[in-house]
Every structure is written in structure tokens, then in C-alpha cells.
Amino acid sequence: MNLIKLVVRNLARHPRRTILTTITFVIAAFVFNVLVAIPSSMDMILRKTSETLRLYSYNADGRYLGLPARYCRGIEGLPHVVACMSMTNLRSSYQNQHEIIQAFAVDADKAGTLYPDYGFPKQVLDQFVRDKTAALVGQDLRNKHRWRVGDTVTLRADSNRLDIRFKVVGELPSRNYPNFFMFHRDYLVEAEKARGISEDERPASLLVTRVDRIDNVPTVIREIDSAFHNSDFETATMTESEAVAGLLSTVGNIREIVYTLFAVILVVVFLIAANSMSMSVRDRIRDVAILRTLGFGAGFLATMLLGECLVMAGGGAVAGSGLAMWLFGGTSTLATVLSYAGYLSMNSGAAIAATLAALGVALLSALAPVISALRESPLEALGRAI
């Protein structure tokens, strides 16, 4: 007798139960893949930013208090400094107040020097430098709003009192910051002056410095903070990876949250699978008794019963993992966690782990009822009222 055909026919006898149990594993695998992707994506971002030669300087009294943009002139005079650029965060909205965009005003002529790892196309970078209304946008932000090169975009800030029109000239080729919106700081200063806002009223949010070599990073950090010690605006300088790590720390222990949720999901799926398998085996009691009287061994019968649960679990896990990769692979961001930074990186390792976990849960939940069914004598099983 063909074991596979027998398993498939048994599953088809109760299609509603089979479908609902499989859907449980689909949902569990889907959630597992997404949860695992969050900490692994953050680790990848930290690993990539640790390889850059950029330093971030914030106000020592508070990261969001800002620093004078003129500090860059002093920083560029320090040894081992390639360039320094001010960066101003403009929290703005697009179309309506709920579509928040974190736009950053930068010194456009220094963008290529500060971010050589981004691989700006020369034509795009030249156009960005020449046109004061030009803007570079992250891939996910551009896809979300369906912006194309050449489109005009209007952002509103300061409770809609400040409207600034931009021209999208290209995509920001950095996957670490897929929601990034970069534009000219001079253009922001000009627009604010027209509304009666002086440059001193909106200082730079941070200063970005590029060092010539990784060995000189600690020295330059000390030199920058020493240069502005006891000034009106003292600096706190750190590497880019430390700045991102600080941002991650504001949302708590992500790993602990993920592992707790995973444990809860595992327990729930285990209970559902155990209940479903118990019902399935109970329905097969007489079938098992008849097959045993016909000479089929315990190994064959155990394989048949366990195979039903493993097929549901394996099929559901594969479908759930595939759905997660289809929905979030390369398009979903960590905007709710990291504002303008980060993206979910779905990988095959998580999908394999989800499938193995589903098969393990299915096997464990099925063992007890299968062993109980095989221990019962055929005579007692045939006489039991199901």
C-alpha cells in the first residue's frame, strides 16, 4: 500500500480540520520570520555602519538641542579630518499630517565626500549639487509615494507654516537609510528666512565628520570634543554605529521582546497542534485496529499518523515563510522602530528555522496520542464508541 497516498486520503477526510490546522502553522511561520528579521536586520545595520569612517557630533546637553553649523569650519582644521558637514533634521509631512517624512538638510557640495560608500552616480550627484531645489530620496520612501525622477514634491513643516518644493533628482543608494530624504541646507535657510525664521533659530541637528583612516577615529573624537569643551555648545562625538546603537536603545530590548513573543507563539501552536492531532488519531482508532489485524506493523502505522501532522506543519511553514519573504523582502522598513533608518532583511535561514520549528512542534504534539493509539489492543479499539 502506498503510504503517501494513504496520508493524503486521510487528510482529505476532514478538509476543514486540515485547512485550519495548516493555517495555524502558516500564521506561526509568518510571524516567526518577521520577528527574527527585526533583530537580525538591526545587527546587519550596526555591522555595516561600523565599517564607515564617519563620526556624528551632537550637543552634549541633549542630542536634539542642536549645534552651530559654523563648528564644521573648526573641525575641518583638525588633523586627519577629510570633511565636515552640518545636517539639520526637518520633521515634515507630505499630503497630510499623518504622512511624516524625516527630511535632512545637508551641505550638498560635501555629500559625495562624506558618503563615498553610498556609490552616488556622478550624474545624479552633480545635479544634486547644482540645483538648490534638488532632493535625494531613499528607495523605500520613493516606492511608498511612487515618486519618480523629475517629480516635484512639496513638504510642509512647522505646523504647515513652512512649505518647501523639491525636485527629485535621484535615489539615495543606501539600504541602511531607505526612508532618508536629503536636500540642500542653503535652500532650507532661504525658505525659513522668507518666513521670518533666522538661521540661529534652527541650528544643525548634528555634524557629520569623515576621518581619513580607521586608526585615527579615536583621536579625532577626542580632538573634536576637546576643541569645544567649555563652549556654549559642547559636543558629544561618536562613531556612526554608536549613534545608530543609541537610537536602537531607545526602543528597549528588542531581542527580549522577540524571544518572549516567539515563546508565546510556540506554546499556542503546540496546544492547537496537539488538540488537532488528538482528534485526528481518535478518528483513526478503528482504522488503526483494522490495519493491525491485517498485519501492518507499528512502524508503518506510526509513520502514517505522524506523516499527516508533519505534512500540515511543513506545508504551513513553507507557505508562511514564503508569504513573509514575498511581502517584506526588500520593501519593508523598520520605520516604526528607527524612524528614517533601517529595513527588514528576510533571509532563508529564518525560513528554514521556522520550518524545522513547525515540524518539531508537530512531531512532539503527535507523539503522545500516536503512542497511546498503538498501545491499545485491536479488540478494545474496535469496541470503543468514537
Image (spheres, rainbow, N blue to C red):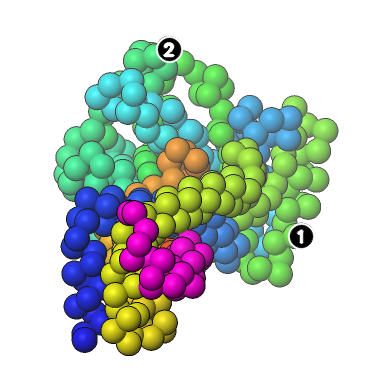
The percent coordinates of residue 19 (x first, y second) are 24, 54
Q: Which residues are magenta?
A: 364-386
User: Which amino acid type is shown beneath numbered disc 1?
Assistant: Thr
132 is higher (above) or lower (below) than 209:
above
Query: Which quadrant of the structure image shows residue 280?
Result: bottom left
- What residue is shown with label 2? 196
User: Which amino acid type is shown beneath numbered disc 2?
Assistant: Gly
- Between label 1 and label 2, give the one nearer the viewer: 1
202 is higher (above) or lower (below) than 264:
above
35 is higher (above) or lower (below) than 361:
above
The residue sitting at 63% across, 27% down in the picture is 65
The percent coordinates of residue 370 (x first, y second) are 44, 68
The residue sitting at 40% across, 77% down in the picture is 302
- What residue is shown with label 1? 219
Query: Which quadrant of the structure image shows residue 112?
Result: bottom left
The percent coordinates of residue 179 (x first, y second) are 38, 44
- Magenta stretch, main secondary structure, is helix
Q: Is residue 329 visible?
A: no
Magenta highlight on residue 38? no
